[in-house]
Image (cartoon, rainbow, N blue to C red):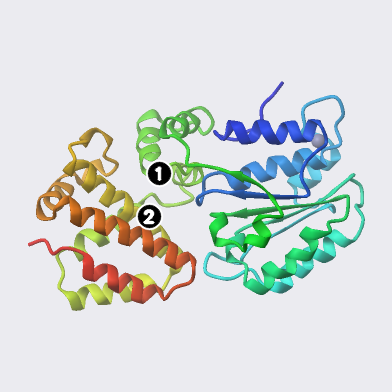
Amino acid sequence: MSQWPVVGHRWAVQQLRHAIEVGEVPHALLITGPESVGKRTLAQQLIAAMLCRATGEERPCGRCPSCRKLASGNHPDFYGVESEDRTTHLRIEQIRDVERFLTLTPNESPCKVALISDFERATVGAANALLKTLEEPPTYAHLILLATDADLLLPTIVSRAQQIVLRPLASHEIEGALIATWGVEAGLAGRLARLAGGRIGWAVRAATGQEPQTQMEVAVEALASALREDLPSRFERAQALARDTATLAETLEAWLTFWRDVLLLQTGNEVALVNLERRDLLGSIGKAVDIAMTLHILAELDHSQDAILANANAQLLVEALMLELPTLS
Ligand SMILES: [Zn+2]
């Protein structure tokens, strides 16, 4: 039997394939996990399998009219919505569209499937609008929600959906997949797997040039500069960084990885370093601050990531971070 082309998450894949086989896919499914960990890829396989019309073989077959329509974005029984970019909300009108879609009976499949991505970006009004559909779904209707963390959603939503939690992948899983599936050269695959922090989607985009790996390098460069700047310069930097929330999220992620490296050096775990190219800078910082300070900065970065997801004032957050950073001579 062939497998779904999903990297890692074996337990989740098995559970969903079993649900397909016995015809018991839940009406409401919530797939959670960090950015780029593979939520969408898993959901796409599930949806294709649900709509696939092949009998007596592994679904999705990839060949039947239903599979082909879905792949070309023209399946009448599938509807997907997401926030327009990572800085905007999911609006109540978008949820109403989902409701309308699910109200009408299926065109050609036994079921209808709606996929809502970035559900942590739903306004309270939008989330509440979805509750009715979740409470009394038509028998043919299936709703799949993707979100980074169930804690960011209304408890009334979470309690009405079956949840599948995806965790960051092990770096050897990412490395193996980059080599086997995407034909990435072994040295680069290893390096990207280390940088990815368990996020296969990021690693693939970096390997295929869709996401400049340099975004991470730019972030580390900005940090290195900030450590040598006075406060007014740091505040200017904070203002520039806060303008684009999507890039800011990537920057904070890179800084977290960097400060974890500082901690690894300080605790004598050099083999696990991600930012090997910046070994000298890591060493200088490791000497300039103590472990308590490193832990404090890591906690502040972690808090900032959560706060930005919760739509806090980005500029104030980055300015507060800049105040915490030590100054290197
Ligand atoms: Zn098919």
Return the x and y of residue 189 as percentages of the image width and height: 40, 34
Of all residues shown, which one is farthest toward the top?
Answer: 1
The image quadrant that residue 105 belongs to is bottom right
- Residue 59 vertical placement versus 319 (above, below): above
Return the x and y of residue 30 as percentages of the image width and height: 66, 50
> Which label is found at residue 313?
none
- Residue 178 vertical placement versus 262 (above, below): above
Assess disc 2: are there few (<14), some (14-19) or many (≥20) residues with their C-alpha within 10 Å of its C-alpha: some
Ligand number 1: quarter of image: top right
User: Residue at coordinates 21% horizontally, 36% vertically from top-left?
Assistant: 270
Type of amino acid under label 2: Glu
> Which label is found at residue 253?
2
Assess disc 1: are there few (<14), some (14-19) or many (≥20) residues with their C-alpha within 10 Å of its C-alpha: many
Q: Is residue 285 left or right of residue 121?
A: left
Residues at discs 1 and 2 in contact (Cβ within 8 Å) = yes
User: Residue at coordinates 49% horizontally, 68% vertically from top-left?
Assistant: 310
